[in-house]
Each structure stands twice: as C-alpha cells, then as structure tokens.
Image: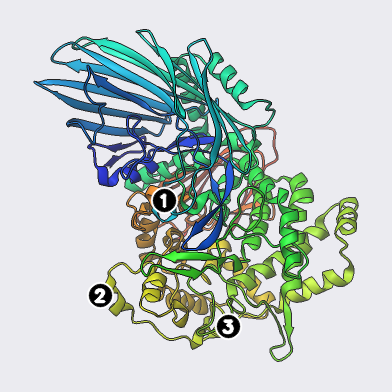
Amino acid sequence: MTATASTWDYDHYDPAGERLRESLCTLGNGYFATRGALPECVADDVHYPGTYAAGCYNRLTSTVAGREVENEDMVNLPNWLPLRFRTGSGAWLTPDDAPVKDHRQTVHLDTGVLERRTRYGLGDGHALTVRQLRLVHMAEPHLAALRTEFTVEGAAADLDVEASLDGDVTNAGVPRYRDLDGRHLTHLQTGEAGDGTVWLRCRTRTSDIRIGMAARTTAAAPVTSAREHLRVTQRTTLRLRPGRTATVDKTVALHTSHDPAIGDPLRAALDRVAAAPGFDELLATHRTAWERLWRRAALEVPGEAGAILRLHLFHVLQTLSPNTADLDVGVPARGLHGEAYRGHVFWDELFVLPYLNLHFPEVSRAVLQYRHRRLERARAAARAIGRRGALYPWQSGSDGREETQRLHLNPHSGRWLPDHSHLQWHVGSAVAYNAWQYCEASGDAEFLHTVGAELLLQIARFWADTATWDAGLGRHRIRGVVGPDEYHDAYPGAGEPGLDDNTYTNVTAAWVLTRALYVLRCLPAPRRRELLERTGLDDEELARWDTVSRTLHVPFHEGVVSQFEGYGDLAELDWDGYRARYDDIRRLDRILEAEGDSVNNYRASKQADVLMLGYLFSPAELRGLFERLGHRLDDDTWRRTVDHYLARTSHGSTLSGLVHGWILARARRAEAWTFCQEALKGDVADIQGGTTGEGIHLGAMAGTLDLVQRCLTGLETRAGALWLDPVPLPELSSYGFSIRYQGHWGVRFRLEHGRLEIAVPASGLLPIDVRLPDRAVRLQPGDTCRLVLPD
C-alpha cells in the first residue's frame, strides 16, 4: 500500500486483506455508500459488497442459543455493483479463480473515484486487462456509475459481459452476527422499463421502507435484459481486438421512501436514471462537487500524517456531507462502510461534530435535529425509570429507543454475558455539549433559542432529578451508571450493575446544568417565558439545578481524581504478566472473563474515562468546573491523574489513542506523538485486529482531524471569540487549514516554525476577535495577521 495526499493505492491482490481494503475503498456521498468490493465478486469469506443508505434500518427477532434476541440493523441494500465477464464459454473471471498477472486498486481522494486495474492471464500468452472507474455521485446523491474498459492481448476474443441488480442479499458482513436473522428485504420484484433500463424494487420486512433501484447499461454492442430469481441482468457480447479497448458503462439510481419529496421510489429511480447523462459528464460534475468540498475543508499537513488525514477526511465527508443536511440521520459510529455495531448511533458525534461545526455547520445542525426529533422518546425513557427530563440511549437507530443489547457473546469463552452499557447515561451530556459547541461555532442564535435550549433543559432536568443527596458526604451523588470506560460496569462481586459517582458523568452533568441555567438567562424574555411554560420549570427547580451543579460528588484517591467512588479500593493488575501471556491485551475484559475473572476487580480501563474531561474542556475551563464543585484541580494533580490512568489503560477502543494523544499534547508533549500515531493508524493499519473490515471508526477518523484543527492550536470558540493557545508537536509543527466561523467562510490558519498566520476573507461581516494567552487581536474582513508564538 502507498499513500499520498491525493491517492490511496494498493498494488497487488491480497485475499486476506480484502475486507479491510473494501472498507477503506468505500465510496459514498452522505446519502448512500458502497463498499469497495470488486464487481465480479460475490459475497463470501473474502469479499463483501455492501451498500447502505443513511438512516435505513430494519428490526428483526432471532433465536440464538435458545434466546430471543431483537436487533435493529442498518440494512444491506440490493447490490448494484455486479458486473462479470468471461471469454468464450469459459468460467467467469474473478481474482480468486483465474490467474492474476497484475492488480492495482486506487482511491483518488481529490475526485472521489475508485480505480481498479486487473490483468487476467487467459493462457497461451493471452491476457485481459480490466480497468474500472467507479463513483457514487456527490452532486447527484441518488446516482452511482461504473465504467469498465476491456483490453485483450494476444488474439481477438469474444467477451460476455453481464451487469446485474441483485436483491439476494443479507446482512452477513460481521461474523459474530451471523447467527442472527439478516434477511431484511422482502417483496422483491424486478423488471424492464423498455428503454434499455432495468429495475428492482423491494421493501424492508418490519420498518416497511420501500426501495427502488434502476440501472442503465450501455456498450458498443447490443444489450439484452433477463429477469432471474431475485435479480435482473443486462447482457452483451463484445468482440475484442488486440490493443483496442471496449467500454461498458453502468449507471444506477437509488431512492427510498424515506427521501424528502418522494412518492414512489421506483418511479423516482427510473426517472433519475433516464435523465442521467453519460459517464463522462457524470464524472465531470462529480469532480466539481468534490472540488467544492475540499475547498471548504482545506487541510495541508505534510508527510505520512497528512496523507492519512486526507483519507480520514475523505471518509468523514462520504458519511456526512452536505447531502446529509436534508436527512433525518445521526452519526453512525462505523460510517456507511459496514455492518459493525449494526449501523447504530452512539456518542461518536462528540468526536465528529467539533470538526464539522467549523466546516459544514449545516450537517452538524442536521445531526442535532436527529437528536431533537427523538427528544420525546428520550423523555419517555426517563419516565420509565422514574425520572424527569430526557435520557438518551447509548445506542440509537431509527426512532430513538435504546438499541443496546442486554446480552453479548464473548468469543474467547463462548459464553453469553450481560451487557450493561445501556447505563452509559453520559451520552445525554454529549448531546448537550454538541448543541452548545455548534452554536458557539456557527453563531446560530435561532437554533440555540429553540432546539438547543430544549435539548439542554431536558437533559439538565434529568441530571438534577437523578442526583440524590448524601447527608454524610454533604454532596449530591449519581449512582448506578457506567462511564466511558466500558470495562467497569459493576463493583466486585456486586449483584447489581452500575457504579456510583463516575467522575466524568458527574462533572459533565454539572456542566450541563450550569450551561442550561446560562442559556435560560440569556434567552429573549418572550422565548424564556414560552420555555418555562412548556416545560413547567419554576424558580424552585432552577434553584435545585444550581445547587446540584455545585455539589455533585467528585471522588479522589491517592492524590488523583478517581474514575468512580471506590476505584481506589480495586486491586492492581499484573500488566507485564498479561502482556507476556497474551501480547495483545486491548480486549482485556474478554481475556479475564475467559479465565473466570472480571476486569471489574482491577484498576484497568479500556479507554480514557476521567481523562475525557481534558479532551472536552480546556485547562482553564476544567479548572473552573472543579472550582464550582468545590475542588482545586491544579497542574500537579492533573499530571498525576494523567500518569495514573495512562499506566492502567489497555486502549481497547480506537478513541483511546486519540484522547490520550490530545491530553499528552499539553501534559507530556514528548509522549504525545506515539498516541497520535496510534489514532492516525487505527483503521489504515487495522490496529484493533480485523474490526476495520466491518466498517471504519468514524469518531476516531474525525477526531484526528480535530486534533490538528483544535488541539494543537488550542482553538476554542467561546464567548463570541476565537481563542488560541498553540502547542505544536515537533512532529507536526507546520501545517495549514481553513474554517468557517460565524458566517465567515474560509478563515485561514497557517502554523509554521513558531509563527501563526490568520487570514480572514473579505466580506461585509463583523470583525473576528482572536484571543491568545498574552494578547487580543481584532481582525477585520480582508485582514491578515502574523503572530510570533512564545516558546
């Protein structure tokens, strides 16, 4: 594999690595995406040609090991890719069954095009070269296209070509889910439109989403159509002459009944493909759309890190593009790239939206609208456990109910174990944090006064109603939760799940309460009155919010901040011994359970928990939060806390390296780059051991972009100003990027050798206030400012 800022290139065929390549070669446009599988290959143990539309879910119940298990999945849609070929009466050619002389697969990041070249050996010195260009159109989000060029060597040959739409698909892309019912599609029909177009329609089994797909295949020879079981095929036979290239183009349209302004999805797909221009014009408009995206997300980082960051940005934009802004969808943790986590929405938007806020705020707004539309479901979840306010689910899908399984299978032991991750109630604080950060970056006062305020108030109400007073401590407590470290879900030997006073949960709850009170004070009086009337908030409840925000318990042990109350009583793990025995101990929980032990017994974390506070809040803001809670968090205490948990974390999540790199950039700069590299290479090197083949880790990818954008520059959008406190790493000290801030498009930052340049494009907007630790600068539109940074 070789990488540049504009290409991601694989130079040979590797069946063992094909699933990983398919994920990293996925093409999408924010509406739908298709994995980078070879069109002549079917789904098997090597290949998995999945196609997924944002927000398209279906719920099924399966019987597994005598248990009824209900799951909602992002649906693998009918496969539009199939295009196979053979010479004469021979077998259909695939790289698994025919001699491969050369093979190269390249993602052109600048243009959003996947190119493949394969040279098949045909015997007797003959060969067939296949070159394909694939796109999922960024400007016309319902269109995709595939151009295939065939060139024969040695002698003339007749080449049979078949292009299909295949409805015989299931959700089978994740081995550990294969015992579950994965057949989500029903009522499948196929047909011909009479104008060289074929079609397929179906619907999901329980969510009843109607799907329409149409395809047009063109070639320099007659094309015929045939309907088969669960598929429709177009066929042609090409007369190939040595050295002369024959081309087959396939154009596909996809619509679902979830689309805005839709009647019949099949009719829409047929109309769309009929109006679609030829491949060359589609390619030109697709390239132009990508050029616009790259301008808005300009990022210039040298070297290997820059190449990986460009790939990460490419996949973020394919999952969440301006095309997403009109959809009712959240942030799928594994992108639109595979079926891991069943396409569910977790808290990963906490790592994605800070980047999008400063480039594509309309997409951030849409993602927050997804949460707001499910506010009533979150309020119902809170009522179900006897609380007021809104309790957002740890895993969300179509309608906002809790999608987290209550049981999971440990592949190390083969045992079904209870899953208590639904107790990660801190996801609500992430929703509130994202709403506030979006408003700070965009200046969207209308959103803050309506959707944002409603989210903040209902989440704050939940925290205030959940907190209980402990007279002995003289503090409020939040009991029975799970923090970001999913390894710890109960106390040793406890009969009930949950932990008390998880510091991350309590501190972020205090932040939500404080911020909600601030927003209420700042609302226009008429709007404030409306909200108070609608929610039934009164002075007594608001006074309780203020009290809870100052008295939530934060535990300490041995001079460091405790992950939760009682953490200091846990045993120490023999880290060296386990590394020697198992080498890779990222999934320490599974290892210990298979030994009859539990990670709950030890000071051992899967990923950052307490340290997540240093990821969300600047040092000054974090000190202020602790002061409000009655604690002094000085630099020495924070450094001890960082050291304590860094030595006790197995990094079983791709987010762990990202957060630790972020923290160490300010706490221990010399060690930061090691963790930054782990975050950068999490997917491209498949550090988690095969998981990337099931879908990328979108939060980690977006987080690395934000690491460059906000962490190393110390960039904050706060109090109507841009705050900067750069901490460039020696390995990443010169780079540039642009942002969109409160209506200013293309504010340019350039950090190089101890100097920071900021350029504000000319416009009729108000000036931008920039605050650094030692000075303040006001930049008028059209101004460029060059600052020398302290060592």
Vertical relation: 389 (above or below) 300 = below
Q: Nearer the viewer, residue 504 or 370?
A: 370
Residue linked to disc 2: 580
Q: Quadrant of the N terminus?
A: top left
Q: Nearer the viewer, residue 517 or 83?
A: 83
Whether the residues at callouts 2 and 3 have beta carbons within 8 Å, the answer is no
> Where is residue 378 shown, x and y percent of the image?
71, 58
Q: Is residue 333 left or right of residue 445?
A: left
> Where is residue 524 shown, x and y percent of the image?
86, 52
Vertical relation: 266 (above or below) 376 = above
Q: Alpha-carbon neighbours of circle 3 within 10 Å: few (<14), some, or many (≥20)?
A: many
Q: Of tags 3 and 1, which is closer to the observer?
A: 1
Amino acid residing under circle 2:
Ala
Numbered label attached to residue 759 = none
Element type where label 2 sits in the image:
helix
Amino acid residing under circle 3:
Glu
> Where is residue 632 shown, x and y percent of the image?
61, 80
Vertical relation: 63 (above or below) 702 = below
Residue linked to disc 1: 174
Is residue 700 in view?
yes
